[in-house]
Amino acid sequence: MGKFILRRLGLALITLFLLSVLVFIGTQLLPGDVGRRILGPFATQEAVDVLNARLGTDRPLLVQYWDWITSALTGDLGFSISFSRPVTELLGRALLNSLKLAALAFVIVVPLSLLGGIVAALKRGKLVDRIITVGGLSATVIPEFVSGVVLIVIFAVFLGWLPGFATAPAGSGLLTQLKHLILPAIPLVLVLFGYIARITRAGVIEALDADYTRTAILKGLPRSRVIRRDVLRNALLPTIAVIASQVGYLVGGLVVVEVLFQYQGVGKLLFDAARNADFPLLAGGVLVVGAAFQVSMLLADLAYSWLNPRIRLS
Amino acid sequence: MDRAKRRAQMEQVDYIRRRSNPVQNHVIDEVQYGKITRREFLRRGSLLGLSFPVMGVILSACGDETAGTTTTAAGGATTTSAAPGTTAAPGTTAAAGPMTVRTALPAPAVGVDPVLINDEGGLAVFGQAAEYLIFSDDELNPVPVLADSWEPSGDGDVWTFHLNPNATFHDGSPVTAEDVVATVQGIAEGNAGPAFQTFGVDPGQVVAVDPQTVEFTLTQPNGAFPFFMSSDNYNAAILPASFWAEYTEGSYEQSFIGSGPWINESYEPGVSAVYVRNEDYWRDNSGQPDRLEITFFADEAAAVTGFQEGRFDTIPHISYSGATALIGSPDASVTSISTAQHRQVYFDTSAPPFDDPRVRQAIALTLNRPNLIEGLLGGYGVVGNDHPIWENFPMYNPDAVGQREEDLATAQQLLEAAGYADGIEAPLDTLVFFEVEDLAQLIAGSAAQIGVNLTVGVYDSGTYYTDYWLAAANSMGIVNYGHRGVPNVYLGAPLLSPERTGDASWNASHWSNEDYDALFDQFVTSGDLDTQREIAGQIQTLLNEEVPFIVPYYVDHISVSSPSFSGLEVTGMGHFSVVEGSLSG
């Protein structure tokens, strides 16, 4: 197990290194001049040149990369151009916000989709199964910005039940913050429900058809006990791994939802950084999102290998 | 009026005249002989440092017993002017208990930093806690704030500002001349840099004469200089010398220090800013709301949705397309002020095909400006005439040149005469900014009617300003110029010969004209309005004929408030104040 973790960590580090190179090159390819971005369109070129020299953006790319990556390794991701703040401070706050939204989405979607998948499997081929699978699939393919806009128009504008802004006023308590996060969490639930429910359904069906299930039933054990102790324990194995792999998406991939609901999570921060050509923030943010994906995948692998001895041993 | 009273008034005027310099006496002459209106006298007089009581005496002597602060807004509506931060009677009864005003602003593009801010979100946030020497209001008046009074030397090349002795910063320290000097020198290298050249300011020649007096010696006379130290130059809010001594990029957000009526309680970049009332404000702010909550938006649609769901009391600035969802709604009060903000559709005049004025005139003649205003701005604008002297500027000369209107036949003839009967292919580059992208498409459509095929390129702001704006590429382009209280900035860097302005040039047309350069010098150094108007007329005519750029229209500033909120003050530049705000119901 230790060897397995070490190998996965090693691969994660290599991936992150490659990502850092790609991110750095990508941000350098963006059009525009850092000094000009900071000082604005009407500053003199002389002032822009002085600032570029001071920031070191006029140095060779390799030197800039080396400085950036060595600083990043010590936890210093530089200074945001657009917000005039350390990147780590901005990312830390945004990461916390993203985690809050992700946690709420998880709390809603995990039990809901597990239940949906199990019910669909147990009612295989019946109307309930069709409703859950087709409905779930339909919800999954609706883009977040479509469901989000519909939700805002109905629940925030017309009915006025829930706020359309995900950011609660400064100093709000936990309940108020939760209230603000309900609407943005729903599109995420819709996207993930169909996926997780289908995986769960497939796992449960496979377990229901397995020899050990038939044996347990033939032994005379009650059906509910067989489902709880034999079917679900085996069926949820791939589902748990799939759920864990969504952490990365929920932490760093919610650009559309966060922008639509004006929520300062990592996704919106990256959007702002890209829009303002804020190179340090964009590079640092992508690196953090990459790390989140890596951690998420590692967690998924660990969960799967812990639950499945065959994987662990190989 | 009895003779004794009349004599007493004239003695007062004589006394004022003896204490006034030649430039101030000239404007007194102008009103006494009926050459300028009373409203214009109030504006010009305050610009030249005459106080309102003094101007009231002069106007009384001229037969006006009602001289006060009631004036006619630049846009035509009659309003009552009051300096921001003072407590004029609010329009509605304030609700009982603590009052919080909630508003939405575009997120500042850069940090809130006096040197770096260059957009509306930034200046609007900056202007809550910090104050200027002078506030340039929506009626083009320079309203005293930290400066009690100011006056030019006889030649207009030395300007002296007298600070209000009661003014203090949030930490209780007085606002002194040293703070003004430190501020001017602090912002010199940033976004405000080129404005120093336009107004003839050498940061080294700004001197603190005594703690309450600061003197600017300009490199050339400038009759509109107070606007340089007003909110028009939005970087120039006065901050303590101690702040400047330790200034680094981003350091302002650690303190948000200023002398204004609001004290920053919290600021989260891209999310929100919260202010509380400055209980020790140096002016009377007893009617001020207790809190101001600003929510930033990246997408205007989100702000509109927030307004519809009742999250905001007011949105100080919104585009016409954003306002369409609210216009006519009983839950929204949509108001607008006329501004000098305009789009410049420039030609690269340094090379064919746009080096020929006939080609430029031809394209300008293809535009149906009223239709553009109606279609793109919903009528919230006024037509331009291919020069940047807005019709509400007092020096605008209405008799100089007729309004250019759509005339396709003449346009076609001009194009043929210039040797382009077979048409022209050229790029039209612009940036993502309000309706500008649509404007580019409509211009391309109009020009196509005479065989000019423009390929529209739309870029983000950073790319556009870095790679396209000043590039000479046989092209056309569109750029935005925000509102100013005087046209000096529009007439300077964007139009003066590039070889003259050098590094500080904003001349996207690469247009060079010695006659224009000479007219500009005469314009900025002239002290009296008659002369300025005469020169402005020549400038209007010259630019209309030469067309280095088209000015299709001037854009109104639209605001929206809930019916229960009143007291929003805005400027065309983007400043806003809710110090006099009140909520009812």
Image (cartoon, grey):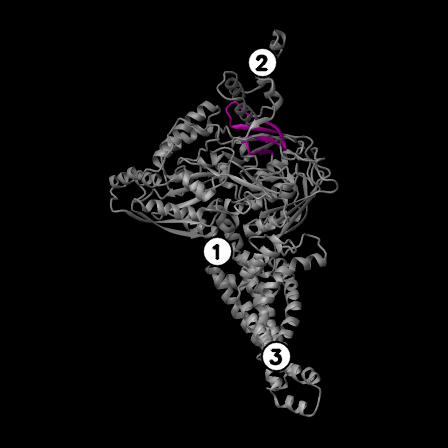
For disc 2, the marked residue is: B14
Q: Nearer the viewer, mark 2 or mark 3?
A: 3
Q: Determine if marks 2 and 3 fall on one subunit.
A: no
In what quadrant of the picture does the N terminus of chain B appear?
Answer: top right
In what quadrant of the picture does the C terminus of chain B appear?
Answer: top right
Q: In the rendered picture of this protein, how many numbered marks are placed on residues?
A: 3
Q: Residue furthest right?
A: B97
- The residues tagged by marks 1 and 2 sit, at their Cα atoms, a distance apart of 63 Å
Examine the rendering and report whether any part of residue B68 can be seen: yes
For disc 1, the marked residue is: A58
Examine the rendering and report whether any part of residue A297 can be seen: no
- Magenta part of the protein: which range? B133-162
For disc 3, the marked residue is: A123
Chain designation of label 2: B
Q: In this view, does B122 lie above or below B220?
A: below
Q: Determine if marks 1 and 3 fall on one subunit.
A: yes
- The residues tagged by marks 1 and 3 sit, at their Cα atoms, a distance apart of 66 Å
Q: Quadrant of residue A166?
A: bottom right
Q: How crowded is mark 2: few (under 14 residues within 10 Å), some or many (20 or more)?
A: few
Instruction: Pinpoint residue B493: horizontal percent, then vertical percent.
Output: 44, 38
Instruction: Pinpoint residue B430: horizontal percent, then vertical percent.
Output: 42, 48
1 or 3: tag closer to the N-terminus: 1
